[in-house]
């Protein structure tokens, strides 16, 4: 949902979208098919799907032997954290951005309703921006590749309302950490999504 809204914001700003989806061995296989539908909806210029095997990572999102928690104690990094995932993803997006001469990378990271992940925090994003400025041939030559995080300080309710204002079709999105014919309704992502739609007083179009 967050990536969809972030991409829609990029389109609204006049950017041509080169979408990137990472198949990293996640248990949630519906995420990939959902990304394909979203790319078609947005009429993106290109959609790259990269296979990066992180199934060995110790995370509830990649290892079926680790249970997906319903709740996490305050200040605790949950079992659904995938080691260095955003660092890997943004690095790959940076390589694609430089290769395609893109001016910006848009990501849907969010620090308000996030689940305690260290790579969703403002300080992490600020450090990565500094890294980008010295990390590529393009930026070392004085050109810019911006790291845009338009949802960073938005609540889930605000993200939903922003998406609707941009004409986003949330029925195309899949948030559940599990795959299946319908969302489980019990995992942290499902709970957060339900809370967002409830706060917005809008029926979730992704529910059967």
Image (cartoon, helix red, strand yellow):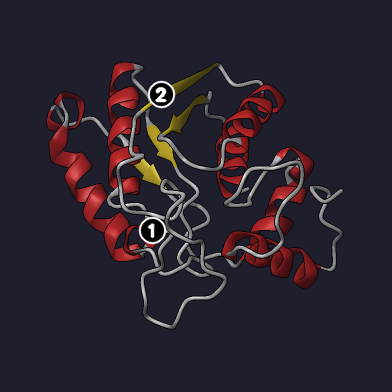
Position of 44 relative to 107 (above/below): above
The spot of residue 33 in percent (x, y) is 63, 29
Mark 2 neighbour class, 10 Å CA radius: few under 14, some 14 to 19, many 20 or more: few
Quarter of the figure with residue 13:
top right
Question: The residue tagged with tag 2: helix, strand or loop?
Answer: strand
Point 57% across, 35% down: residue: 29
Instruction: Give the labeled residue for mark 2.
Output: 50
Quarter of the figure with residue 55:
top left
Q: Seen in the image, is 71 located left or right of residue 105?
A: right
Point 63% across, 50% down: residue: 175
The spot of residue 158 in percent (x, y) is 66, 63
Checking the image for residue 6, the label placed there is none
Residue at far bottom of view: 74
Position of 42 relative to 132 (above/below): above
Asked if residue 167 can be seen in this view, the reply is no
Position of 45 relative to 2 (above/below): above
Asked if residue 157 can be seen in this view, the reply is yes
- Are the two marked residues, 2 and 1, in contact with CB atoms closer than 8 angstroms? no
Instruction: Give the labeled residue for mark 1.
Output: 81
Q: Seen in the image, is 73 located left or right of residue 208?
A: left
Point 29% across, 40% down: residue: 88
The spot of residue 162 in percent (x, y) is 69, 54
Q: Nearer the viewer, residue 44 or 141?
A: 44
Position of 71 relative to 205 (above/below): below
Q: Seen in the image, is 59 located left or right of residue 173?
A: left
The spot of residue 75 in percent (x, y) is 37, 80
Q: Nearer the viewer, residue 85 or 64?
A: 64
Identify the mark nearer the N-term, 2 or 1.
Answer: 2
Q: Nearer the viewer, residue 145 or 118?
A: 118
Point 26% across, 48% down: residue: 129
Question: The residue tagged with tag 1: helix, strand or loop?
Answer: loop
Residue at far front of view: 65
């Amino acid at each position: 949902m967050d990536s969809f809204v972030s991409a829609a914001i990029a389109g609204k700003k006049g950017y041509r979208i080169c979408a990137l989806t990472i198949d990293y061995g996640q248990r949630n296989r519906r995420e990939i098919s959902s990304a394909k539908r979203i790319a078609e909806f947005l009429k993106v210029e290109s959609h790259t799907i990269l296979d990066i095997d992180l199934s060995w990572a110790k995370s509830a999102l990649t290892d079926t032997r680790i249970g997906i928690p319903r709740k996490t104690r305050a200040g605790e990094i949950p079992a659904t954290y995938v080691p260095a995932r955003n660092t890997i993803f943004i690095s790959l997006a940076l390589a694609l951005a430089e290769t395609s001469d893109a001016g910006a990378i848009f990501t849907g990271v969010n620090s308000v309703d996030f689940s305690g992940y260290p790579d969703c925090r403002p300080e992490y994003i600020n450090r990565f921006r500094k890294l980008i400025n010295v990390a590529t041939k393009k930026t070392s030559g004085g050109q810019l590749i911006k790291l845009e995080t338009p949802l960073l300080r938005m609540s889930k309710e605000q993200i939903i309302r922003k998406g609707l204002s941009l004409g986003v079709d949330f029925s195309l999105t899949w948030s559940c950490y599990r795959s299946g014919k319908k969302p489980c309704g019990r995992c942290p992502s499902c709970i957060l999504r339900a809370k967002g739609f409830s706060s917005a007083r809008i029926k979730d179009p992704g529910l059967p």
